[in-house]
Image (tube, rainbow, N blue to C red):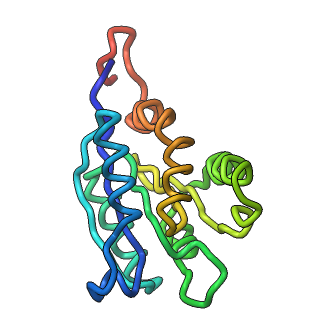
Amino acid sequence: MGTMTRVAILTASDSGARGDRADASGDVIATRCIEAGHTLVRRAILGDDRASLAAALAGWCDEGIADVIITTGGTGLTARDVTPEATREIGEREVPGIPIALALGGLRKTPFAALSRGAAVTRGVTLVVNLPGSPGAVAEGMDVLLPLLDHVAELLRGPVNHDGRQM
């Protein structure tokens, strides 16, 4: 097996950014990624502000620090839920199957999963995926995402020789 996937976590939460609420959902992502053998390279909490979220996502992608950036929070229907818009703004290509898979997984547990508006995009060699803000929904989302991460990272890094080295 090749290198483990480098994962960054961006939490969108006004109360989390103010320090009023613990980042339980970010903790779920971090724990699940580390348990699966991935490397956690960066983690931040920002308020629900489209420009700030877009700038952070674009910067992390352009720096090439992570193979996958997983966001949590800001995917619902309130006026402050702007994470999908920020994600689409910085994305170069949509990956529509991931939100479909996440919705299907969530719908097995609750009809409210249909209300999540999360996006998945690539920018450069990084995949950005939005998960909801609730720790339960994040855990379900990680069940869907974890089996994909190594393959996604391999595909985005580009063609490899038969001996596994980058071309």
User: Which quadrant would the C terminus be assigned to in this image?
Assistant: top left
Q: Is residue 133 left or right of residue 119?
A: left
Q: Residue at x 56, y 49 (%)?
A: 140
Position of residue 73 measured from the top left corner of the image (x, y, whole percent): 48, 71
Position of residue 110 measured from the top left corner of the image (x, y, whole percent): 72, 59
Position of residue 28 measured from the top left corner of the image (x, y, whole percent): 38, 55
Q: Is residue 131 depicted above or below 39 in this figure? A: below
Q: Is residue 108 left or right of residue 16?
A: right
Viewer-proximal residue among 61 and 80: 80
- Quarter-wise, where is residue 42 in the image? bottom left
Q: How many marks?
A: 0
Position of residue 116 measured from the top left corner of the image (x, y, whole percent): 66, 67
Q: Residue at x 72, y 66 (%)?
A: 112
Q: Is residue 31 left or right of residue 144?
A: left
Q: Residue at x 22, y 51 (%)?
A: 41
- Quarter-wise, where is residue 21 in the image? bottom left
Viewer-proximal residue among 125 and 8: 8
Q: Is residue 39 left or right of residue 110?
A: left
Q: Is residue 34 depicted above or below 46 in this figure? A: above
Q: Is residue 20 depicted above or below 144 in this figure? A: below
Viewer-proximal residue among 157 and 145: 145
Q: Residue at x 56, y 59 (%)?
A: 137
User: Which quadrant would the N terminus be assigned to in this image?
Assistant: top left
